[in-house]
């Protein structure tokens, strides 16, 4: 164990990382409460404005795996500072956008900056903590990101109501810029690798030629399909099936965010258990079954809300566990691996939203529930039949 690992991560650094991922999650999802006002201001439809969110996720998915090798080669500090600054400038620029095209450009910048942050933060945690403590730290950071949904989105909606759609961008961008200053002053410089090649191809090759990381990526993408799908279609289901209006769905959406916070935090503790794979298979199957039943059977409205809370808690347990596993497999290419993992998150989000919409058009909400149940079964099957039997995870100290 290195001296850095013995020192570990300071409480200030861990809290700062938590604040960063909170702002990342809030900035990526902040368009939702503002869509109607943006569409009215720019003279277009909600569907067209909604593509701004898709554009942000696309730049995220492209950037995240590419920035990992840079972080692994030149250190975490410069990548973290550049990413946070880009995100802050992108958000602030969105606040002064004068047209749909200018807002699209600033959201693309926001996506690039945001994508640089979670992989770098997760790798920095793994760099500086002993393996036994990494899972809990990752769980804490992942849970903090979901606070951006449970707390950040309602606040953004309130700010938009009080001061118009530009105010949330000014506040969120200002907070990001304010956080950048103490990080620039206090983050350790780390070791510089001057003259060292990024060696992009070999870093991906060292991870991609193994089967075990691909198991993790597939399991995570399937599980993200369930979680993002639940988040995406819950409000529409309550409006169409129970006659709620948009305002009435806000508490339910907040509870989904709270459930994801609890699940992510709990996942950090499950990550340290010897039989984590057995736990994860059961948790994934139960969570997927609840999501499937939620959209399929005719329960009363508040029972559906309670089911959504329990389901979001369960299906979010896997993320810190799988993040920890892929970093253990990656060795010194941790940020590269977490970048690939981040892209699998975005793939799951696209499938959860797009395939969910297709199933909705073909068979209504019961078909949506069946899709998410199938995704949960796929995730549990990969974990139970492939990951649990793989020698690579035993060699990495992942399971007994």
Image (cartoon, grey):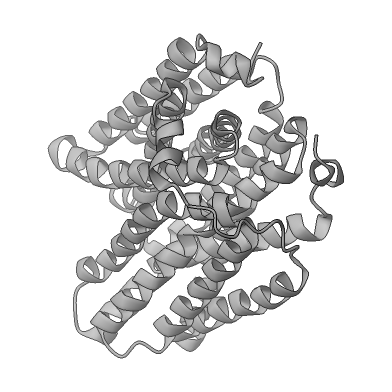
| Residue 388 x %, y % | 53, 12
* Residue 137, placed above or below residue 198: above
Side of 338 relative to 139 (left or right): left
Residue located farthest toward the left when viewing the structure as drawn:
362
Looking at this view, is 358 or 379 the one in front?
Answer: 379
The residue positioned 66% from the left and 79% from the top of the image is 178
Give 243 or 307, whichever is nearer the viewer. Answer: 307
Q: In this view, does 51 lie to the left or right of 253?
A: left
For residue 151, say whether it is visible.
Answer: no
State the image quarter where residue 138 is shown: top right
Identify the image quadrant of the N terminus: top right
Residue 343 x %, y %: 39, 46
Residue 36 lies, with reference to residue 51, above or below; the image says below
Query: Residue 235: x, y in percent?
Result: 38, 53
Residue 65: percent from left, percent from top:
42, 49
Residue under the image location 80 percent in, 39 percent down: 2
Quick check: can you spot residue 366? yes
Picture quarter with the C terminus: top right
Q: Is residue 366 toward the left or the right of residue 21 in the image?
A: left
The image quarter in which residue 324 lies: top right
Q: Which of 250 and 194 is in front in this view?
A: 194
- Establish if 37 lies above or below 382: below
Q: At x 41% / y 16%, what residue is drawn?
A: 381
User: How many callouts does the rendering have?
Assistant: 0
Is residue 72 toward the left or the right of residue 61 in the image? Answer: right
């Amino acid at each position: 164990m290195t001296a850095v690992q013995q020192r570990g991560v300071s409480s200030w650094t861990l809290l700062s990382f938590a604040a960063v991922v909170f702002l990342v999650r809030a900035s990526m999802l902040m368009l939702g409460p503002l869509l109607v006002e943006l569409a009215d201001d720019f003279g277009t439809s909600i569907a067209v404005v909604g593509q701004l969110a898709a554009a942000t996720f696309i730049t995220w998915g492209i950037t995240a795996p590419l920035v990992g090798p840079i972080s692994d080669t030149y250190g975490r500090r410069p990548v973290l500072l550049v990413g946070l600054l880009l995100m802050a400038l992108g958000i602030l620029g969105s606040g002064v956008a004068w047209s749909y095209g200018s807002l699209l450009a600033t959201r693309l910048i926001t996506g690039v900056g945001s994508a640089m942050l979670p992989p770098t933060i997760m790798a920095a945690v793994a760099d500086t903590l002993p393996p036994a403590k990494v899972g809990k730290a990752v769980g804490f950071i992942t849970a903090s990101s979901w606070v951006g949904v449970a707390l950040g989105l309602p606040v953004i909606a309130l700010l938009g109501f009080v001061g118009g759609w530009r105010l949330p961008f000014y506040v969120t961008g200002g907070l990001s810029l304010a956080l950048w200053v103490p990080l620039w002053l206090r983050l350790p410089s780390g070791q510089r690798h001057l003259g060292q090649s990024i060696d992009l191809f070999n870093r991906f090759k060292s991870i991609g030629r193994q089967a075990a990381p691909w198991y993790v990526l597939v399991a995570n993408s399937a599980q993200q399909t369930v979680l993002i799908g639940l988040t995406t279609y819950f409000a529409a289901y309550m409006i169409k099936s129970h006659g709620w209006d948009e305002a009435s769905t806000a508490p339910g959406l907040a509870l989904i965010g709270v459930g994801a916070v609890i699940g992510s935090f709990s996942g950090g503790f499950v990550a340290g258990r010897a039989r984590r794979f057995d736990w994860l298979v059961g948790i994934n199957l139960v969570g997927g079954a609840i999501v499937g039943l939620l959209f399929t059977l005719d329960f009363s409205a508040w029972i559906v809300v309670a089911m959504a809370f329990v389901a979001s808690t369960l299906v979010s347990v896997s993320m810190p566990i799988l993040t920890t596993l892929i970093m253990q497999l990656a060795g010194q290419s941790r940020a590269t691996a977490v970048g690939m993992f981040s892209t699998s998150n975005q793939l799951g989000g696209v499938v959860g939203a797009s395939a969910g919409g297709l199933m909705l058009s073909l068979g209504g909400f019961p078909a949506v529930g069946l899709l998410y149940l199938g995704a949960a079964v796929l995730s549990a099957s990969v974990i139970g039949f492939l990951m649990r039997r793989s020698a690579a995870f035993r060699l990495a100290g992942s399971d007994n």
